[in-house]
Amino acid sequence: MLTKRIIPCLDVRQGRVTKGTKFKNNIDLGDPVEMAVAYSDGGADELVVYDITASAERRPIDIQMVTEVAKSIHIPLAVGGGISCVADMERVILAGAEKISVNSLAVRQPDIIAEGAAAFGRQCIVLGMDPVHNPKCPCGYEITTRGFREFTGMDALEWAKRAVDLGAGEIVVNSVDADGTREGFELTITKMIADAVGVPVVASGGAGRPDHLVTVFRDGHADAAIVAGMIHTGDYTITDIKRAMRDAGIPTRMSY
Amino acid sequence: MTIAIIDYKAGNCTSVLNAFASLGVETVVTREADVIAKAERIVFPGVGAAKSAMENLTAFGLADVVREQALSGKPFLGICLGMQILFEHSEEDGGVNLLNILPGKVKRFPDTPGFKIPEIGWNQVNGDIDYYFVHSYYAEIGPYTTGRTEYAGVTFTSAVRKGNLFAYQFHPEKSGKAGLALLKEFATC
């Protein structure tokens, strides 16, 4: 049986992993390679690394960092931040990443999804989206971009469906409302998108305790979930999360 | 000892190279037919679509050398699409003839409620160890199937062994310690 994936997320700023709440108040957590290795050995099913300041600084993704992380772990690696064209995607793939996450770029230029899928296969192209609760949108959630700074007026569910039609192989649903709160995932939008698209959905934002993961898989219908603060601080390990999943009857990889 | 990783613009050679490097095993990434023919061991990776992969193999003049080497008795390892291409035929893109080294066909997972396509994630081989899979198509069970995995109501071939020909539908280079153990076995067989 296919297991539900636990995916630690490393937000990298100037070569260091940082963590903030709603993209603010960032604190230093450590070296990306050391943390990647520790999580890989500790049971991570995949790893995602975001170069969170690349876009704002209008520079390409830190390829050296991606290369070092890819050399050090032997589980799937997704990266995002600072991708602006297919050539950038190719550099990331040649550096050893499996998946490229596009977010604000895809909103501005939806064809980048189709171009990336045509060049590398749809399994390489991950659409990241940052929906925020907005009752004026048909599905109740609006897409934001540029680290929650810009509101697009786009309906989150419509965007998810369109992105899959264009060639997105996975969708990361990162709730703006839940991000950094550690009070649990936003189940409504996660379930809505997971039930509506034929590709895997990765829940993101709000993981604070192992039971939050149980809930997002059981009730949010997620295929995978991103965890950050709750493991970065050392409050919980990936094994703590996976034991809770196993005890709740959710398929999870336990030998690593 | 040389291990040649065949680069035909259909897959992530870097990940395979990195995985062998972590085992202290040197590899060479190449699309030169004579380098491939002289190598002691050959890795045939691949992700993406069968049709474009077959077209690339032909365009680089590699289809014959890959077929010869896979049949040579030399240790040969197909990974993911590099496994599927060893079979007879794929349903992908309206039908593609493959290298016809292994008997059997490659089919698309049926649309099945509760199952996403592609299958992305860790699944068990022979009900035991988890490995990392990414695929929308699968090879039927055949005479050389050594590993079976279930998804979307189908039991498919996840591992093949025919003499020194090894092939995996999953990605050993991305399957953590369990995957590295398989690559080590291949490098020393």
Image (spheres, coloured by chain):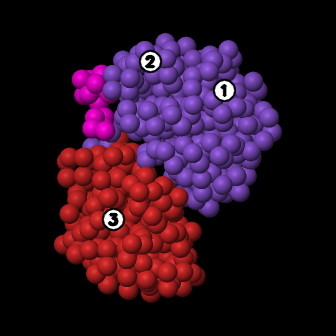
Chain colours: A purple, B red
Q: CA distance from mark 1 to mark 3?
A: 51 Å
Residue A234 numbered tag? 2
Apparent side of residue B139 relative to residue A179 in the rendered image (left or right):
left
- Magenta residues (range): A242-256
Q: Which residue is mark 3?
A: B187
Residue B51 seen anywhere in this rendered image of the structure:
no
Q: Position of residue B169 (x, y in %)?
A: 35, 60
Q: Are marks 2 and 3 in contact (CB under 8 Å)?
A: no
Tell me the quarter of the image containing the N terminus of chain A.
Answer: top left
Secondary-structure class at tag 2: loop
Between B12 and A221, which is closer to the camera in this rendering?
B12
Q: Could you tell me which residue is drawn at 75 percent across and 37 percent down?
A: A55
Q: Are marks 2 and 3 on the same chain?
A: no
Q: Nearer the viewer, mark 2 or mark 1?
A: 2
The foreground one among A107 and A204 is A204
Q: Chain letter for mark 3, please.
A: B
Mark 1 vs mark 3: in front: 3
Whether labels 2 and 1 share one chain: yes
Which of the pair A22/A13 is nearer the observer?
A13
Residue neighbourhood size for the residue with mark 3, other residues' Cα within 10 Å, grouped as few (<14), some (14–19), many (≥20): many
Can residue A29 be seen here? The reply is: yes
In the image, what residue type sits under mark 1? Glu
Chain letter for mark 2, please. Answer: A
Q: Quadrant of residue A22?
A: top right
Disc 3 residue type?
Ala
Q: Quadrant of residue A52?
A: top right
> Which amino acid, by three-letter code, is at mark 2?
Gly
Q: Which residue is mark 1?
A: A142
Q: Secondary structure at mark 1?
A: strand
